[in-house]
Image: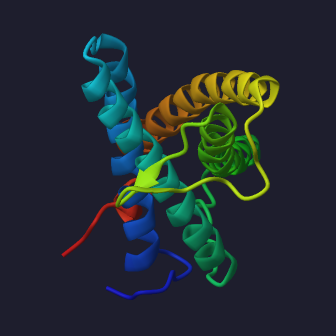
């Protein structure tokens, strides 16, 4: 398998970014629900820090993925896919990318402005230029919550489209993103 994308297939690096980010996002969803059920404050702080570190990991992977995407050919949808579906697919991909950048950024702003930045090896990782500011933290929290809902909807649509292509259209759209031998 090639490292780079070809006109008909995604390369292994693109697949790594896709599935790696998906795995971290799914972990974030689980941790987000777990956070709501924990009553022990020390455990809650630890889980919250893991949540923030996963968010920073997503941000780093998205920066790398965005750079990789700019230097690789886009793999087009099959010509049998109607133009309106291609437009919707491009729009959803754009919104997924945007949400996966803005979600961790808004979380990082919220955490830093609240005075609880993520810690890595005991070192606070404050967002540069952000200081304690309750109003900013509250705004970032609202943005973070809104993007969470948008992201869940986009992920659901993305998964439904992949299943539709595989089960109904019986084309290669899903298969070309799956890890191969």
State the image coordinates of residue 26 (x, y, percent, origin top left): 35, 39
In this view of the protein, can residue 170 be seen by the observer?
no
The residue nearer to you, when weighing 155 against 5, is 155
Going by the image, does 170 lie left or right of 161? Answer: left
Residue sitting at x 54%, y 56% = 125
The residue nearer to you, when weighing 40 against 92, is 40
Residue 37 lies in what quarter of the image?
top left
State the image coordinates of residue 118 (x, y, percent, origin top left): 48, 47
State the image coordinates of residue 115 (x, y, percent, origin top left): 61, 36
Q: Is residue 69 above or below residue 137?
A: below
Question: Which quadrant of the figure contains the N terminus?
Answer: bottom left
Question: Which quadrant of the figure contains the C terminus?
Answer: bottom left
The residue nearer to you, when weighing 176 against 57, is 57
Q: Is residue 154 above or below residue 22?
A: above
State the image coordinates of residue 74 (x, y, percent, origin top left): 64, 72
Residue sitting at x 66%, y 84% = 71
Residue 175 lies in what quarter of the image?
bottom left
Going by the image, does 148 lie left or right of 47? Answer: right
Residue 40 lies in what quarter of the image?
top left
Residue sitting at x 73%, y 37% = 132
The residue nearer to you, when weighing 68 against 78, is 68
Q: How many marks?
A: 0
In this view of the protein, can residue 17 be seen by the observer?
yes
Q: Is residue 149 above or below residue 27?
A: above
Going by the image, does 13 lie left or right of 101? Answer: left
């Amino acid at each position: 398998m090639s490292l780079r994308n070809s006109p008909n297939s995604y390369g292994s690096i693109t697949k790594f970014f896709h599935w790696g980010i998906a795995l971290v996002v799914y972990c974030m969803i689980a941790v987000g629900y777990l956070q709501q059920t924990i009553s022990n404050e020390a455990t809650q702080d630890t889980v919250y820090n893991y949540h923030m570190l996963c968010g920073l990991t997503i941000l780093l992977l998205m920066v790398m993925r965005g750079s990789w995407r700019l230097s690789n050919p886009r793999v087009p949808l099959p010509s049998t896919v109607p133009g309106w579906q291609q437009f919707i697919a491009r729009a959803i991909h754009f919104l997924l990318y945007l949400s996966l950048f803005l979600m961790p950024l808004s979380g990082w702003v919220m955490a830093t402005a609240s005075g609880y930045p993520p810690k890595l090896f005991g070192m606070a990782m404050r967002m540069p230029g952000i200081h304690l500011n309750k109003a900013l933290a509250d705004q970032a929290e609202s943005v973070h919550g809104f993007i969470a809902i948008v992201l869940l909807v986009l992920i659901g649509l993305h998964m439904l489209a992949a299943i539709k292509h595989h089960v109904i259209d019986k084309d290669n759209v899903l298969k070309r993103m799956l890890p191969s031998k």
